[in-house]
């Protein structure tokens, strides 16, 4: 398998974390690139120039983080990250995590592109939604970080990215129990090895 990713993308980091949790990260050849430069190496597999992209063993290019994660769950069944008994709850947590990532990206990108002033109303709305979501996420994340499922992994990456790109949210002060749980996740090798430089 091959994986197209960047070092700071939370979407790509999620896939890297899943691969590491599955013990398969060394089986995957990685291609680090900048999707904003629309590199031909990426658009040959994903015309939208979005990462991550996973090239399966049969050559199929899979895009979008959740699609890739569910594919990996199927071809690398151990450890189980989406238990059948709790599948709906796991996918709900994953959805909350991806929404948190999307909101944080929506705040960061206008700053990166020099559009912060024009996007100020949207920025405020996104921050408000993140503040609303944090107590919900805190109520649904795992308890000790020792046996995370896919939803926990996505939430963990989302919280890390939020701390990195939207530090003014200071979510750790608002949700100390969630912050403690997150620290346990960040100590896992899958998180430590995929941390942005």
Image (cartoon, rainbow, N blue to C red):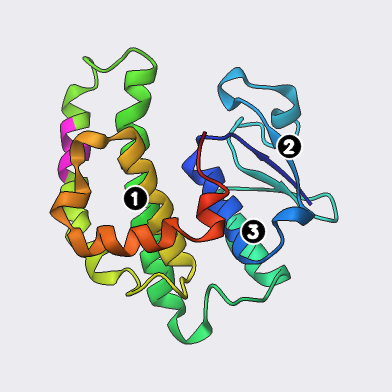
Q: Which residue is mark 3?
A: 19
Residue denoted by label 1: 159
Distance from Cα at disc 2 to Cα at disc 1: 29 Å
Q: Nearer the viewer, residue 114 or 188?
A: 188
Q: Position of residue 87 (x, y in %)?
A: 46, 78
Q: Give percent across and percent down for residue 196.
A: 50, 37
**Which SS class for mark 3?**
helix
First in residue order: circle 2 vs circle 3 = 3
What's the residue at 14%, 53% (across, down)? 174
Disc 2 packing (10 Å; few <14; some 14–19; many ≥20): some
Q: Earlier in the sequence, mark 1 or mark 3?
A: 3
Q: Is residue 118 visible?
A: yes
* Dot 1 alpha-carbon crowd within 10 angstroms: few under 14, some 14 to 19, many 20 or more: many
Which mark's residue is nearer the viewer, 2 or 1?
1
Q: Position of residue 160 (x, y in %)?
A: 38, 47
Residue that lies at the very extreme toward the right in this rendered image: 58
Cα distance in 3D space between marks 2 and 3? 20 Å
Q: Is residue 66 visible?
A: no
Query: Which quadrant would residue 72 be assigned to in this image?
Result: bottom right
Disc 1 is placed on an element classified as helix
Q: Nearer the viewer, residue 155 or 21?
A: 21
Residue at image coords 16%, 32%: 124
Using the image, tell me which numbered label, if any, was put on residue 45: 2
Q: Which span is picked out in magenta?
A: 124-128
Image spot of residue 145 (x, y percent):
40, 69
The answer to if 146 sits in the magenta stretch is: no
Q: Determine whether the residue tagged by mark 2 lies in a helix, strand or loop.
A: loop
Q: Nearer the viewer, residue 15 or 38?
A: 15
Residue 23 vs 129, above or below: the answer is: below
């Amino acid at each position: 398998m091959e994986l197209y990713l960047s070092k700071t993308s939370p979407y790509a980091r999620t896939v890297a974390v899943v691969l590491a949790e599955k013990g398969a990260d060394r089986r995957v050849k990685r291609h680090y690139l900048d999707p904003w430069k629309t590199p031909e190496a990426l658009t040959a597999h994903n015309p939208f120039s979005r990462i991550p992209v996973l090239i399966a063993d049969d050559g199929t290019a899979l895009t979008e983080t959740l699609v890739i994660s569910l594919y990996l769950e199927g071809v690398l069944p151990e450890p189980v990250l989406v238990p059948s008994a709790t599948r709906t709850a796991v996918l709900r947590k994953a959805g909350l995590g991806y929404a948190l990532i999307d909101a944080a990206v929506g705040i960061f990108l206008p700053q990166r592109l020099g559009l912060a002033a024009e996007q100020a109303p949207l920025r405020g709305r996104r921050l408000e939604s993140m503040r609303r979501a944090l107590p919900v996420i805190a109520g649904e994340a795992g308890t000790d970080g020792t046996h995370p499922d896919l939803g926990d992994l996505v939430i963990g990456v989302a919280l890390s990215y939020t701390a990195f790109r939207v530090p003014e949210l200071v979510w750790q002060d608002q949700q100390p129990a969630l912050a403690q749980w997150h620290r346990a996740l960040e100590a896992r090798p899958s998180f430590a090895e995929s941390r942005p430089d």
